[in-house]
Image: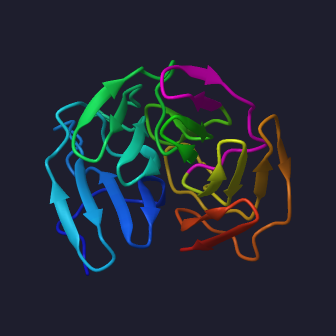
Amino acid sequence: NDLIHYSEVQSNNLVGIVNAGLALGHNMPSAGRPNIQKWDGSSWTEETQLTVGCSYGNSVAGTQNAAVSAGGRNGSHFETTKTVEYNGTSGYAAADMPTGYASLGVAGTQNDSYFWAGDEYNPVGVANCDSLNYNGTTWATGATTLRNHLDGVSAGTANAALAAGGKYIVGSGDHGGYVCVEEYNGTAWYNVNNLNVAQRGPGGDGSQSSAFAVGK
């Protein structure tokens, strides 16, 4: 069944399992309040919008009833530092990220999550290889990725993550995909076998050793 309404839902702001999913995304960045839609295996239900801020381009870790959303863009397209936790019923503001990011890769749980290699500055199109750990209370700087994976596939856990594909950035203009794949062991990133086909903006999921990518 379709989503109840259009939303800025991408691979990195969907979490859960096949019978208990959560889409925490936004289609009106100027409003600053993302939509929450839950999946029960056959249909979607719409929860009350969050009353705390985060916006489109956010990334989400966790489960249907214990999620954390970080980053995104505000109505002026600037990256935000906002962090929001969701307990299955309501959302509440958590500790801000030290720097604003959008479209980060993400893996892990609400209280042990890892975010990496997103879009850092306005205007859209300036990428980075930064990463951050979130322990449910505070943020800490993590290991840099070997290359940017903006809008790539994310999979795994906070200490066994996978980043695949992503976008070549050409100023603020168009961008193409690439095949680079990296794994993270809790300390550093390292290259592994490339994707068979270059991809940008794909969906994907799984664990570090059993993941999939689908998209363009």
Can I make out residue 58 in this image?
no
The answer to if 118 sits in the magenta stretch is no
Quadrant (top left/top right/bottom left/bottom right) for the C terminus: bottom right
| Residue at 45% from the left image edge and 45% from the top image edge | 59
With respect to residue 171, does 155 lie above or below? below
Residue 9: percent from the left, percent from the top? 35, 59
In this image, 155 relative to 96: left or right? right
Q: Quadrant of residue 179?
A: bottom right
Q: In the image, what residue occupies the spot 31% across and 41% down?
A: 87
Q: How is the image coloured?
A: rainbow
101 displayed left or right of 182: left
Locate residue 1, reporting x and y percent: 26, 81
Q: Is residue 133 magenta?
A: yes
Q: Position of residue 90 (x, y in %)?
A: 22, 39
Q: Is residue 39 visible?
A: yes
Residue 94 quadrant: top left
In this picture, is 24 found above or below 77? below
Magenta span main SS: loop
Q: Could you say which is closer to the camera, residue 78 or residue 95?
A: 95
Residue at 40% in and 40% down: 69
Q: How many marks?
A: 0
From the viewer's perspective, is 117 left or right of 99?
A: right
> Where does the magenta region start and end?
131-150
Side (left or right) of 109 relative to 16? right
Residue 57 position within the rendered picture, expressed as x and y whole percent measured from the top left: 40, 46
